[in-house]
């Protein structure tokens, strides 16, 4: 009888232990399933998040305003934009500054989304323009890195340089004479009896430059004025020359002449004395001379 009682008590104890174990393990298993599900969600979101730095521009010489463009190249939207972290680092990463989000920009260093304005969600495939306003610490000349990190820890960077605007190197223009036309046509009489072209110097002289304008055949065409003078103040202003056909009372058809523009060395700046002649070809048409 005692053995029966003992066996019964052991059976009851075993069942109680099993119930207690099940009551402990079952919630734990449920909790583990929730944790695994949440972990999967986080992992999926992390894997699907990717951003790419595109370009940065320093606006102004003092480096106080910087515009930067980033693209969401991942498969998920990023939100909220205001929760992203932005660091402005030196090019060698030895130093850096954490820039806080503020819209509109604050009196201290801050960044905000410039375009699309007021955006709180960074849609997948979308490019945003952010603006850094560095009221407290404008950037000195150098190389910098903008590092942008999403709320779930994915980062993108832009490397850029901020430097002094280089002074352009200008190649001196050698002395020269420029004619507006290389050829002209005039009639001996009537309509079309005259034509014009202009003359200008190609670079500033050290003093006045005197030019002579002549025709290789004054019996066919003449040029007026015969002399041009350019000074240090008007050297870049074109001067006009008029060509007039000459009625020679001879049936000679089409006649070509050279209009020669030459530097008068004795009256001209030293730099222009070695400049060669410039020539325009003038054609005179015999449009009926005789009865």
Image: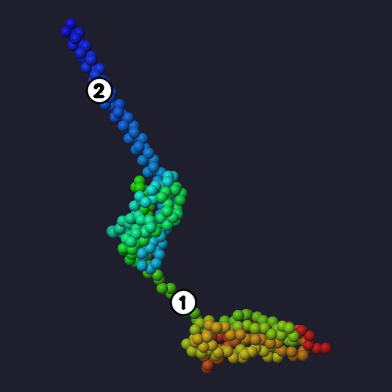
Q: Position of residue 17 (x, y in %)?
A: 23, 20
Neighbour tally class for label 1: few under 14, some 14-19, many 20 plus, Cα within 10 Å: few
Specify which label sits upstream in the sequence, 2 or 1.
2
Residue 67 placement, left or right of 196: left
Is residue 67 visible to us here?
yes
Residue in the image at 76% along x and 84% along y:
287
x, y percent for residue 13: 22, 17
Locate the N terminus and report the quarter of the image it occupies.
top left
In the rendered image, the residue lying farthest to the bottom is 266
Disc number for residue 119: none
Please say if 148 is above or below 163.
Answer: above
Q: Percent x, y for residue 113? A: 41, 55
Kindly report the distance in space between the C-alpha atoms of the residues bearing marks 2 and 1: 94 Å
Disc number for residue 20: 2
Residue farthest to the left, as pictured: 2
Question: Quadrant of the rendered structure where residue 11 is?
Answer: top left
> Circle 1 sits in a helix, a strand or a loop, which is it?
loop
Q: Secondary structure at mark 2?
A: helix
The part of the image, by quadrant, that contains residue 54 is bottom left
Q: Which mark is residue 171?
A: 1
x and y percentages locating residue 244 in the rendered image: 68, 87
- Determine whether 9 is above or below 265 in the image: above
Q: Image quarter for residue 36?
A: top left
Is residue 98 shown above or below 188?
A: above
Toward the viewer: 242 or 124? Answer: 124
Q: Nearer the viewer, residue 242 or 178?
A: 242
Residue drawn at point x = 74 percent, y = 87 percent: 189
Which quadrant does the C terminus fall into?
Answer: bottom right
Dot 2 crowding, Cα within 10 Å, few <14, some 14–19, many 20+? few
């Amino acid at each position: 009888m005692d053995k029966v009682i003992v066996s019964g008590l052991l059976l009851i104890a075993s069942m109680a232990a099993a119930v207690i174990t099940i009551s402990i393990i079952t919630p734990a298993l449920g909790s583990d399933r929730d944790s695994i599900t949440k972990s999967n969600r986080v992992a999926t979101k992390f894997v699907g998040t990717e951003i790419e730095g595109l370009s940065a521009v320093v606006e102004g010489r003092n480096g106080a305003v910087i515009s930067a463009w980033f693209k969401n190249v991942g498969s998920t939207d990023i939100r909220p934009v205001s929760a992203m972290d932005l660091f402005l680092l030196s090019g060698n990463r030895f130093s850096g500054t954490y820039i806080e989000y503020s819209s509109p920009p604050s009196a201290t260093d801050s960044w905000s989304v410039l375009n699309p304005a007021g955006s709180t969600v960074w849609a997948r495939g979308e490019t945003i323009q952010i603006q850094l306003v560095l009221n407290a610490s404008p950037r000195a000349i150098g190389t910098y890195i903008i590092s942008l990190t999403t709320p779930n820890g994915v980062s993108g960077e832009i490397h850029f340089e901020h430097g002094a605007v280089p002074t352009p190197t200008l190649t001196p223009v050698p002395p020269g004479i420029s004619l507006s036309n290389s050829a002209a046509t005039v009639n001996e009489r009537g309509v079309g009896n005259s034509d014009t072209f202009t003359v200008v110097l190609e670079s500033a002289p050290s003093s006045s430059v005197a030019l002579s304008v002549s025709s290789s055949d004054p019996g066919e065409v003449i040029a007026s004025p015969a002399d041009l003078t350019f000074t240090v103040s008007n050297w870049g202003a074109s001067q006009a020359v008029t060509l007039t056909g000459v009625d020679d009372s001879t049936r000679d058809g089409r006649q070509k002449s050279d209009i020669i523009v030459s530097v008068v060395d004795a009256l001209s700046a030293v730099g222009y004395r070695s400049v060669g002649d410039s020539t325009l070809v003038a054609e005179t048409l015999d449009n009926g001379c005789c009865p």
